Image (cartoon, rainbow, N blue to C red):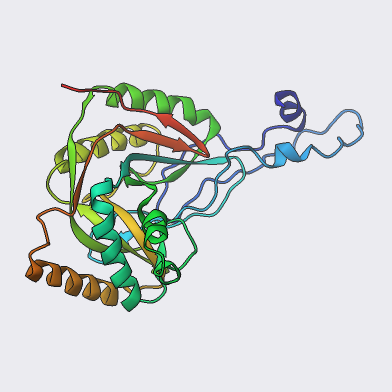
C-alpha cells in the first residue's frame, strides 16, 4: 500500500490550518511547471480502488446548536478523501430504573409532535408506540454521549499525536456522578434538524468542563477549532427535521409541568456514573481516560 502511494505520489496537503464551523480540510495537488522531464515515460496504470477509498474515512456528522444563544455542537461537514472524523466524548448509558419513565414521556411527546425519530435511527417514534418494550429498547437501549469537543476532520499523521496527548492529559481521572437535570431543545447550525436533549446543570458539570478545557488544549496544539466558549453538556435522545424548537420546547415544558403537579418530577431526570472518556477517529474507538475508584 505505501509503495503504491509512493509511486503515484501523495497529493494531500500537510498544512493544518485552523478551521471554522464551515471549513473542511481538502487535498490539493502540486506541480512544478519549470521542471521538464528528460525522458518520456509511459503513464502509470490506474491505482487500485483501495487507495481511492481510505479505511475509516470521514463521513458526514451532525452537530447541534442550542435554540438559545449558546451553541453546543457544530454543523455537518462534507466527506473529503483522506480525512478522518475526530470525536472526543464521555459515553453515557441510561440506567434501567429510569428507562420506563423516560420512554413514557418520549411516547407522549412523539404523539403530539409528529416526525420525532430516535437518535441515529430513521424510524419515527410514532411507529413504535404500540409496543412498549420495543419503544424503550429503540429509544433508550443504546449508548449516548456527552461531547467534549467539536467533531472535526483530521489527517492520518495527526492521529497518534492526538490520542497520545489526550491520554497523557486525561489519565488521572476519578469516577463521579453525572446528573442529567433538565430537558432542552437544540438545533443544528443550518436549522435543518431539531434535537430533544437532557442537559447537565449540576452534578458532574465541573468535572466535564475541566475535561472540555483539556480537549481544547489538545485541539489548539493541533490547530483544530476549539469547543464553544459556553458549552452546555448534554445527551440527545430524539431528533426531527427542520427547526421545530419552539413547538417541541413548548410540548416538553407542558408535559414536565404535569409531572411536577403530579409530584413525580424529581430534581434530576436521572444520574449516570462517569465510566471514562473515549475518542472515536473514523470507525475506530480509543479508550482515553483511566480513573481510580477513590
Q: Quadrant of residue 175?
A: top left
Residue at left offset 39%, top offset 55%:
63
In the image, residue 116 lies at what x, y percent? 39, 69
87 on left or right of 39? left
Looking at the picture, tell me which residue is in the foreground, 127 or 151: 127
The count of marks equals 0
Residue at left offset 83%, top offset 40%:
46
In the image, residue 231 lies at what x, y percent? 24, 50
Looking at the picture, tell me which residue is in the foreground, 188 or 239: 239
In this rendering, the answer to whether 151 lies above or below 66 is above
In the image, residue 143 lies at what x, y percent? 38, 45
Q: The N terminus lies in which quarter of the figure?
A: top right
Q: Quadrant of residue 91?
A: top left
Can residue 33 be seen at all in this image of the molecule?
no
105 on left or right of 223? left
51 on left or right of 141? right
Q: The C terminus lies in which quarter of the figure?
A: top left
In the image, residue 123 lies at what x, y percent? 48, 65
Looking at the picture, tell me which residue is in the foreground, 285 or 105: 105
In this rendering, the answer to whether 279 lies above or below 110 is above
In this rendering, the answer to whether 107 lies above or below 216 is below
Residue at left offset 40%, top offset 51%:
20
Residue at left offset 49%, top offset 63%:
122
Can residue 151 be seen at all in this image of the molecule?
yes
Q: Quadrant of residue 183?
A: bottom left
Amino acid at each position: 500500500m505505501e509503495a503504491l502511494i509512493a509511486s503515484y505520489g501523495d497529493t494531500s496537503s500537510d498544512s493544518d490550518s485552523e478551521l471554522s464551523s464551515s471549513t473542511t480540510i481538502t487535498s490539493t495537488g502540486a506541480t512544478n511547471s519549470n521542471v521538464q522531464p528528460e525522458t518520456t515515460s509511459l503513464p502509470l496504470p490506474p491505482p487500485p480502488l483501495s487507495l481511492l477509498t481510505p479505511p475509516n474515512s470521514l463521513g458526514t456528522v451532525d452537530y447541534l446548536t442550542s435554540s438559545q444563544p449558546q451553541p453546543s455542537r457544530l454543523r455537518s461537514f462534507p466527506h473529503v478523501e483522506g480525512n478522518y472524523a475526530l470525536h472526543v466524548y464521555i459515553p453515557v448509558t441510561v440506567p434501567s430504573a429510569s428507562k420506563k419513565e423516560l420512554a413514557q414521556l418520549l411516547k407522549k411527546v412523539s404523539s403530539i409532535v409528529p416526525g420525532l425519530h430516535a437518535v441515529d435511527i430513521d424510524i419515527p417514534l410514532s411507529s413504535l408506540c404500540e409496543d412498549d418494550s420495543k419503544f424503550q429498547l429503540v429509544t433508550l437501549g443504546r449508548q449516548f454521549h456527552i461531547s467534549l469537543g467539536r467533531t472535526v476532520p483530521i489527517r492520518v499523521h495527526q492521529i497518534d499525536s492526538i490520542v497520545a496527548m489526550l491520554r497523557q492529559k486525561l489519565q488521572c481521572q476519578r469516577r463521579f456522578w453525572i446528573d442529567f437535570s433538565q430537558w432542552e431543545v437544540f438545533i443544528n447550525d443550518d436549522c435543518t434538524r431539531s434535537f430533544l436533549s437532557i442537559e447537565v446543570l449540576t452534578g458532574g458539570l465541573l468535572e466535564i468542563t475541566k475535561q472540555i478545557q483539556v480537549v481544547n488544549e489538545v485541539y489548539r496544539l493541533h490547530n483544530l477549532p476549539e469547543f464553544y466558549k459556553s458549552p452546555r453538556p448534554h445527551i440527545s435522545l430524539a431528533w426531527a427535521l427542520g427547526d421545530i424548537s419552539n413547538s417541541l420546547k413548548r410540548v416538553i415544558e407542558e408535559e414536565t409541568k404535569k409531572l411536577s403537579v403530579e409530584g413525580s418530577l424529581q430534581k434530576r431526570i436521572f444520574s449516570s456514573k462517569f465510566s471514562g472518556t473515549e475518542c472515536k477517529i473514523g470507525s475506530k474507538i480509543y479508550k482515553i481516560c483511566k480513573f481510580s475508584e477513590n
